[in-house]
Amino acid sequence: DVKVTQSSRYLVKRTGEKVFLECVQDMDHENMFWYRQDPGLGLRLIYFSYDVKMKEKGDIPEGYSVSREKKERFSLILESASTNQTSMYLCASSPSGAGTFGEQYFGPGTRLTVT
Amino acid sequence: AQTVTQSQPEMSVQEAETVTLSCTYDTSENNYYLFWYKQPPSRQMILVIRQEAYKQQNATENRFSVNFQKAAKSFSLKISDSQLGDTAMYFCAFMKYGGSQGNLIFGKGTKLSVKP
C-alpha cells in the first residue's frame, strides 16, 4: 500500500513564525501536492511538484513556498505564519502515467493553528 | 475554467439503504476524468471510484457506482447497502485529459452520515 506520512497531526504556532510542514511518500511517485482544506471551501491546491526541484504554483500560493530536494519528500513552508493560515493541510502523491491520472494518495493531514 | 459543484452540503441515510450524492461540473473539454474521493472522520482521504469521459459504461466498485451523464455534465455517486463505515466527507473531482497533474479540481464536498 502507498503510504504518505506527514510530520505532525496537530501544530500550534505563533503569528510571524516560520513553519515547516513535512510530507514523505514511500511509493516512488513523481508527483506530490500540498492542499489546504477549509470547511465549505473544499480542497485548494497550494503547490505541486512533478519532479525533484521542480514545482508549480496552485490556486493559492501566496504566503507559502515549497521544497523538494528528494523524490520522496515535499515540504511546505509558511515564511511568516498568519492567523488566516490556520487550516488543515493535506499532502498527496501520485504516479505519472495515463492510466493513473487524478489518482492521488493522501496523507492524514496536519491541523495548523496560528495564534 | 472548469468548476465542480456539489449541491448537497450534508446528507444522511439509514444503514442498509441506498443514497445518491450529486455532482455537476462545467467544462468545454471533451476528454476528461471524474472521481469520487472519500474522507472518513480523522482518517486519510481515499479514492473511491474513477470514470473516464470517453467510456459510456458507468464505473462500479462493489457497493459504489456512478451515474455519468456526459451531456448533462452530471456525475452522481450511488452507495448501495450503506454501512456505518461509509460515514465521511465525499468529494467529487475533475481532471482534463492530458492536463497537468496539478489540475485536479475538487468540489466543496458532501458530508454523509449513515445512521444505525
Image (spheres, rainbow, N blue to C red):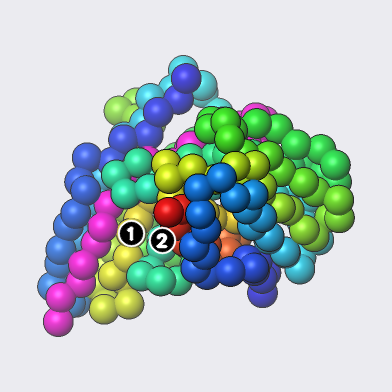
Q: Position of residue A29 (x, y in %)?
A: 76, 56
Packing grade of label 1 (10 A; few <14, some 14-19, many >=20) is many
Which image quadrant is residue B22 in?
A: top left
Query: Secondary structure under badge 2?
Result: strand
Relative to the observer, which residue lies in front, A54 or B79? A54
Q: Position of residue A99 (x, y in %)?
A: 68, 48
| Residue at the image point whose x is 77% and y is 46% from the top | A67
Q: Would you say B66 lies left or right of A96 here?
A: left
Magenta range is B93-116
| Residue at the image point whose x is 26% and y is 78% from the top | B84
Q: Position of residue A80 (x, y in %)?
A: 60, 42
Task: Name the amino acid type tagged 1.
Answer: Met
Compare marks 2 and 1 and give the one earlier in the sequence: 2
Packing grade of label 2 (10 A; few <14, some 14-19, many >=20) is many
Q: Position of residue B71 (x, y in %)?
A: 34, 26
How far separated are the C-alphas under marks 2 and 1? 6 Å
Which image quadrant is residue A42 in?
A: top left
| Residue at the image point whose x is 20% and y is 46% from the top | B8
Q: Is B107 one of the magenta-colored residues?
A: yes
- Number of marks in the rendered image: 2
Query: Secondary structure under badge 1?
Result: strand
| Residue at the image point whose x is 53% and y is 32% from the top | A60
Relative to the observer, which residue lies in front, B35 or A49? A49
Relative to the observer, which residue lies in front, B45 or B22? B45
Quadrant showing the C terminus of chain B:
bottom left
Task: Name the amino acid type tagged 2.
Answer: Lys
* Chain of residue at mark 2: B
Q: Would you say B40 lies left or right of B97 here?
A: left
Q: Is residue B63 above or below residue B110?
A: below
Q: Which mark is residue B38?
A: 2
Q: Is there one chain holding both mark 2 and mark 1? A: yes
Mark 1, residue position: B89
